[in-house]
Image (cartoon, rainbow, N blue to C red):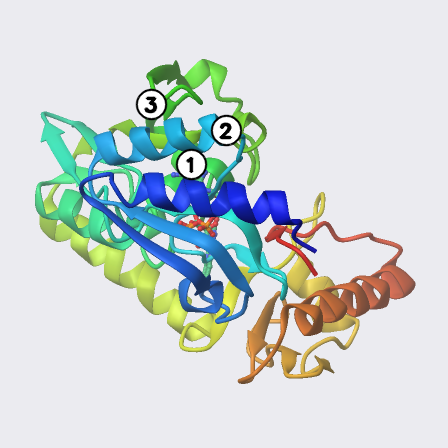
Amino acid sequence: MTTQSETDVTCSLARRLARIPHLELREAEPLSRHTSFGIGGPADLLVIPQRPEALREVIREATNAGIQALYLGNGTNLIVRDGGIRGLVIRTSGGLSDIAVEGTAATVECGVSLARLCFLCGERGLAGLEFAAGIPGTMGGALVMNAGANGGEIGDLIEWVEVVTPDGSCKRITRRNLDFGYRSSALRDLGLSILRARLRLRPDDPVEIHRKLCDTMALRCAKQPVSRFSAGSIFKRPDGDYAGRLLDEAGAKGMRVGRAAVSTKHANFMVNLGGATASDVIGLIEAARELVYAEFGVLLEPEVCIVGED
Ligand SMILES: Cc1cc2nc3c(=O)[nH]c(=O)nc-3n(C[C@H](O)[C@H](O)[C@H](O)COP(=O)(O)OP(=O)(O)OC[C@H]3O[C@@H](n4cnc5c(N)ncnc54)[C@H](O)[C@@H]3O)c2cc1C
């Protein structure tokens, strides 16, 4: 429930945000439009900064209003509950998409899609990102999650990350202070907005890189329900095993709660059959965890981030 004073704060913030140049502002915006699951209640306010100065100004205004914003990339690792987000969501995808290449270093803004980055670096003969082909997130989301596949992780390539502090200034954090681990990084707990990062790549033959990128994409299409509404792997890999194997052998494939189902193609993916709610998905996550626990005594840990109000 939103109180009158919270509504007043949000309205006054909306008026201030409307004055910021290079900023798109939407009110009562359904987050189902901004998540790959196609699920999620409304955000009171959603902004899409087109330039770093606009992002910094938004953060300054949010801090002055006492509001902690939620940062959103492509929404491909997010379940937003059905009640949505009170306050402010800052979406970086659709803006903040600069890539500057200098020698073997690429400085990449947080809204850049990994898909674009992989192929652009490949064309310039810069290798290292082949593992990431087909991961549908942004640079910001990939850094927070330390996105990875096929033995590679984004954290391995990072020199530094620039974040925006609550007063709107920028701070550079070098890799050794970022604590990259399996699908985790210090950035997740910091709760600050990532602005850009510098990646160190290595020279290689563009044709060879392109071939590897295409092979990785083809493998994904063969194994994963890539054309369905999902959030990728639901659970993290447990020690020494695979969540997909445990779920498959426990008989989870095809399990349903409401309009959410465990994919029949890959047991660690859940899909929105059309009209699923966040409660359906969260109910299905619980049911699948219980099934695996009963069968194997392993408690799976969700990889997806669950945010918002019921
Ligand atoms: C079909 C499919 C396949 C996938 N395959 C893989 C895979 O192989 N490997 C893998 O690791 N993941 C995979 N994913 C999951 C997802 O794509 C990654 O985790 C991705 O890095 C998330 O990026 P995003 O921009 O969508 O982040 P979001 O989902 O928007 O956000 C994820 C987290 O990052 C935070 N965040 C986002 N941007 C910023 C920012 N600028 N500043 C601060 N915080 C921010 C959010 O608040 C949230 O906590 C897959 C998803 C799908 C749908």
Q: Name which of mark 1 and mark 3 comes first in the sequence.
A: 1
Q: Mark 2 points at which residue?
A: 187
Residue 39: in sight, yes or no?
yes
Up the image or down, 127 lies above or below 225; here it is: above
SS of the residue under disc 3: strand
Q: Which residue is drawn at 48% across and 74% down?
A: 229
- The relative height of residue 197 versus residue 183 in the rendered view (above or below) is above
Q: In the rendered image, which residue does mark 1 sit on?
A: 143
Image x and y of residue 31, in percent:
47, 63
Comparing 175 with 304, the one in front is: 304
**Looking at mark 1, is its residue's CB closer than 8 Å to ligand 1?**
yes
Give the camera-side residue of 111 and 286. 111
The residue labelled by disc 3 is 162
Name the N-terminal-most of marks 2 and 3: 3
Q: Residues within 10 Å of mark 2 (few under 14, many from 20)?
A: many
Residue 19 sits in quarter: top left
Give the quadrant of the N terminus: bottom right
Q: Marks 1/3: CA distance?
A: 11 Å
Residue 310, x across and y down, in percent: 70, 61
Q: Marks 1 and 2: CB-CB under 8 Å? A: yes
Disc 3 packing (10 Å; few <14; some 14–19; many ≥20): some
- Residue for point 71% across, 82% down: 256
**Mark 1–mark 2 distance (CA, rounded to whole Å):** 7 Å
Residue 209 is left or right of residue 296, and the answer is left
Give SS at disc 1. Answer: helix
The Cα–Cα distance between marks 2 and 3, rounded to whole angstroms, is 11 Å
Asked if the residues shown at circle 2 and circle 3 are in contact, with their CB atoms under 8 angstroms apart, the answer is: no
Residue 35 appears in the picture as rendered: no
